[in-house]
Image (tube, rainbow, N blue to C red):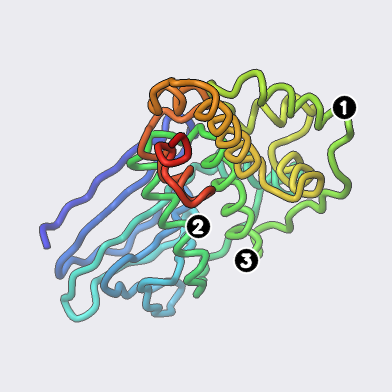
Amino acid sequence: MTESVQFQQVSEIPGLVLSTARFAAFSFDRHFHLDLHVGLVTDGVQRQRVNGKTVLHGPGSIVLMPPGEIHDGITVDGSQSTLKTFRLSQELVASVAEEISGLHREPEFAGALLEDPLLAGHLLRLHNEMRWCNAASSLAMQAEWLTLLERLLSQSRTIVPETVPGSLSRIQWQRVRDYCFSHLSDKITLDELAGLCSLGRFQFLKQFKQTIGMTPHAWLLRLRLERACALLSRSSQAIAAVAQEVGFYDQSHFNRAFRQAYGVAPSCYRA
């Protein structure tokens, strides 16, 4: 394995930096960070000493390293390992924690090792998507980012998520529905939909799911695919043009989503 370290700022989320590091027989001296680190080892095993304790960090586990926590790191038995990290500035964490908890106060962190393969898998997929898809402002990724941070911060007992009762009003739902129908070819963000309802993003996600029984992204995806079906059956437009008209800017993504929803490719639906 060739040793390498890569950093990538996520421009749509100020204060977030992604890193991917590949090590072979490498060790970190004792050090600390000024931001919050969420670490995922995807292969190999790393050993860390934190607060006088030694922990092993491998695939399926999540390390939460708070600002100022002194620690080291070494690959076990000189093996190879890959570490992927979300680096969140204190300002970003405070903003998200307030949004999720509904409380205006600085979150208190403690180092944590969470053994949760399912959450680790979701975080790893999000890390990869943010690195390669260049779509951190998309509705799906915004919702996934907020949802996973809720799970991570609540599991680590950093915050208690706000209880969001009720559902969208008839007027709020109509605004969201009308906006999506009229902007189907555009990129629609979580911020825009929440703003239509005069709600925070976290509140909107909870109340939308309570109202519709689907996430905003799942509902919008189905709306786009249903509109695509109508266009495919009524016109001779090229499939790529249909995909773009309903908001898919990648035809391969459109083909995959269509096949998953209806069991056939768009070309077969038309035939």
Question: Relative to 251, is 37 above or below?
Answer: below
Q: Would residue 114 be seen by someone viewing this image from the given angle?
A: yes
Residue 48: x %, y % from top left:
35, 72
Question: Relative to 62, is 252 above or below?
Answer: above
Q: Would residue 91 be seen by someone viewing this image from the given angle?
A: no
Labelled disc at residue 171: 1
Q: Is mark 3 on a helix, strand or loop?
A: helix
Q: In which quarter of the image is the N terminus?
A: bottom left
Camera-side residue of 179 and 20? 179
Residue 154: x %, y % from top left:
66, 61
Residue 121: x %, y % from top left:
45, 63
Camera-side residue of 185 and 157? 185
Question: Relative to 55, is 39 above or below?
Answer: above
The residues bearing labels 2 and 3 have C-alpha atoms spaced at a distance of 15 Å
Q: Evaluate if marks 3 and 1 touch, with contact meaning CB atoms under 8 Å apart.
A: no
Residue 133 in which image quadrant: top left
Farthest-out residue, left: 2
Q: What residue does disc 3 label?
A: 155
Rendered residue at 42%/54% (across/down): 125
Q: Which comes sooner in the sequence, label 2 or label 1?
A: 2
The residues bearing labels 2 and 1 have C-alpha atoms spaced at a distance of 42 Å
Q: Which of marks 2 and 1 is in front?
A: 1
Q: Nearer the viewer, mark 2 or mark 3?
A: 3
Q: What residue does disc 2 label?
A: 66
Residue 265 in which image quadrant: top left
The residues bearing labels 3 and 1 have C-alpha atoms spaced at a distance of 35 Å
